[in-house]
Amino acid sequence: MSPRRSYDQFCSAARALDAVGDRWTLLIVRELLAGPRRYTDLHADLPGVSTDMLASRLKDMERDGLTARRRLPPPGAAHVYELTPRGRELLPVLRALGEWGQDGLGERRPTDALRAHWFALPLLRALEEAGVEAGVVEVGLDEGDFHLYMGAEQGPLYGYGPAPEEPDARLALDSSTCTAVSRAELGLAEAVRDGRVEVTGDGAAAKALRENGT
């Protein structure tokens, strides 16, 4: 575990940055918003981080009360990392950072990695703006599928792959449309109306999207 570094300033923003200002910390939080994850899964979805750096950051985050490590019962029998309630309180920080960073997203560079679920937080905002308050929404992109838990106060906000049960709505769209929605250049209801997002399903979420897209 690395020694705690501090700005040594009596300021709440400085104290917060003491805990989450290091490189990779907030991106680890982003990944753990999907629920408990194994170390190998975290490493796979954080391209560019070294194994030593990831291990160090996870230890620091556990020390600072942001994450906890536990062992799954058999047959899993693997250690997983998960956010504590304190760590989950960083959700609005990540959402605000994402919205602030929209203008700097620009075009995808050849060196940019991409995982489908990295669109989860921007799409949560877009779905809320489109009138979806609750339910499971499955999203299909060329890069893969993921699902969102709208209105979730506890537990994961999103998950990897198709929804484990029949979703309330399924969205099919390409990454360029998803990027435009994430940048707030295109509203989700507008994208549905223009045929850039295909909505299927019979749940309240699907009905809300179709009604607001007309």
Image: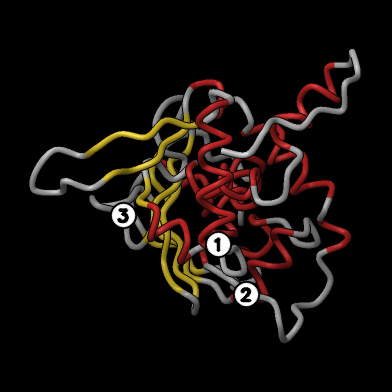
Of the pair 214 and 130, the residue shown nearer to us: 130
Q: Identify the residue position indicated by label 2 in the image.
A: 113
In this view, the residue farthest toward the top is 10
Residue that lies at the very extreme toward the bottom in this rendered image: 110
x, y (%) of residue 91?
62, 34
Label drawn at residue 55: none
Q: Nearer the viewer, mark 1 or mark 3?
A: 1
Compare residues 177 and 34 and report the one nearer the observer: 34
- Mark 3 lies on a secondary structure that is loop
Q: Nearer the viewer, residue 136 or 92?
A: 92
- Mark toward the start of the polypeptide (3 vs 2): 2
Q: Residue at x 74, y 78 (%)?
A: 108
Q: Disc 2 marks which amino acid?
A: Ala
Res 46 label:
1
Mark 1 or 2, nearer chain start: 1
Do labels 1 and 3 touch, CB within 8 Å?
A: no
Rendered residue at 54%/72% (across/down):
173
Q: Could you tell me how far apart the alpha carbons at marks 1 and 2 are, in whole angstroms?
A: 9 Å
Give the distance between the C-alpha atoms of the residues marked 1 and 3, in whole angstroms.
Answer: 22 Å
User: Which amino acid, mark 3?
Assistant: Ala
For residue 200, which quarter of the picture? Answer: bottom left
Circles 3 and 2: CB distance less than 8 Å? no
Residue 199: where, in percent of width, then height? 46, 62
Residue at (64% x, 44% y) in the render: 25
In this picture, residue 151 sits left or right of residue 19 = left
In the depicted structure, whether residue 133 falls above or below residue 137: above
Q: Is residue 171 left or right of residue 14?
A: left
Q: Residue under label 3, please give it.
A: 163
Mark 2: which secondary structure?
A: loop
Q: Dot 3, crowdedness within 10 Å: few (<14), some or many (≥20)? A: many
> Which residue lies at the image location 53% right of the left edge and 23% below the top edge?
65
Applied colour scheme: secondary structure
